[in-house]
Image (tube, helix red, strand yellow):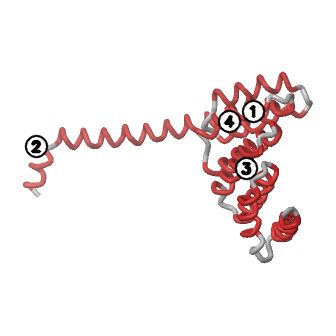
């Protein structure tokens, strides 16, 4: 016991430093979590406030409010939801390029669960622009990003339709052929119909 007591006495300063450092780390984690929670709450409140003019159809007001949310809280779920709504506002005004830019920027800081939705909305923007090749590209990315099987097949069907519209028949056919093999999936029936349409065009 005396040896242990002597060791503690000789090493009292290092022990104090370690305990002090651990306390600082614990306090830092606590502060960070509180700050993160506060940020999420503020982002949520800002999104809720921005949704009112959006629902009322006041697009100019909604656009400014949503831009504020996306710029201040880009990495939060509310910030990414705001980017989706902002793109819809811009699409409504036929500002397709601006809407696509908003979504592409949101992709850079998006959580995994938002990536598929963002990619599909980018694809929708290109569809409205009439660029079906780019639409197909982003539907393909959405299909890869989603963790849900049924959604994956739905995005692949959208990709195949866009490829058909772009005149890329062979690429479209390959996708439809794969989807036609999916017994019990909702897209199977459409895949068989589309393959019939493509065969009739030969």
How far apart are the two marked residues, 3 and 2, measured between alpha carbons? 71 Å
Tell me where residue 22 appears, x and y as whole percent.
33, 43
How many numbered discs, if any? 4
- Mark 3 or 1: the one toward you: 3
- Mark 3 or 2: the one toward you: 3
In terms of sequence position, does the residue under pointer 4 or pointer 2 come before the other? 2
Residue at image point 75% right, 63% down: 173
Residue at image point 65% right, 60% down: 147
Q: Does residue 17 sit above or below 181 in this rendering?
A: above
Tell me where residue 91 appears, x and y as whole percent.
82, 33
| Side (left or right) of 16 relative to 26 | left
Residue at image point 80% right, 76% down: 184
Q: Secondary structure at mark 1?
A: helix
In terms of sequence position, does the residue under pointer 4 or pointer 3 come before the other? 4
Q: Does residue 37 sit above or below 61 in this rendering?
A: below
- Check disc 3 and report the residue beneath it: 136
Q: Secondary structure at mark 3?
A: helix
- Residue pushed farthest bottom? 183
Packing grade of label 4 (10 A; few <14, some 14-19, many >=20) is: many
Q: Which mark is residue 99?
A: 1
How far apart are the two marked residues, 4 and 1, measured between alpha carbons? 15 Å
- Check disc 2 and report the residue beneath it: 10
How far apart are the two marked residues, 2 and 1, measured between alpha carbons? 66 Å
How far apart are the two marked residues, 3 and 1, measured between alpha carbons? 17 Å
In terms of sequence position, does the residue under pointer 2 or pointer 1 come before the other? 2
Residue at image point 86% right, 28% down: 93
Quadrant assignment, res 169: bottom right
How far apart are the two marked residues, 4 and 3, measured between alpha carbons? 26 Å
């Amino acid at each position: 016991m005396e040896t242990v007591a002597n060791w503690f006495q000789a090493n009292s300063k290092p022990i104090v430093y370690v305990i002090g450092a651990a306390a600082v780390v614990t306090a830092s984690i606590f502060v960070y979590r509180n700050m993160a929670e506060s940020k999420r709450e503020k982002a949520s409140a800002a999104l809720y406030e921005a949704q009112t003019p959006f629902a009322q159809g006041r697009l100019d007001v909604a656009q400014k409010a949503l831009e504020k949310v996306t710029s201040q809280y880009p990495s939060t779920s509310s910030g990414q939801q705001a980017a989706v709504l902002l793109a819809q506002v811009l699409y409504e005004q036929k500002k397709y390029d601006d809407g696509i830019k908003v979504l592409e920027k949101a992709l850079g800081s998006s959580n995994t669960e938002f990536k598929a939705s963002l990619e599909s909305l980018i694809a929708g923007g290109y569809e409205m622009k009439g660029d079906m090749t780019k639409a197909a590209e982003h539907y393909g990315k959405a299909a890869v990003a989603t963790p849900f099987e049924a959604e994956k097949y739905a995005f692949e069907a959208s990709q195949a339709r866009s490829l058909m519209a772009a005149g890329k028949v062979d690429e479209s056919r390959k996708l439809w052929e794969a989807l036609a093999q999916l017994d019990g999936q909702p897209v199977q029936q459409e895949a068989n119909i589309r393959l019939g349409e493509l065969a009739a065009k030969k």
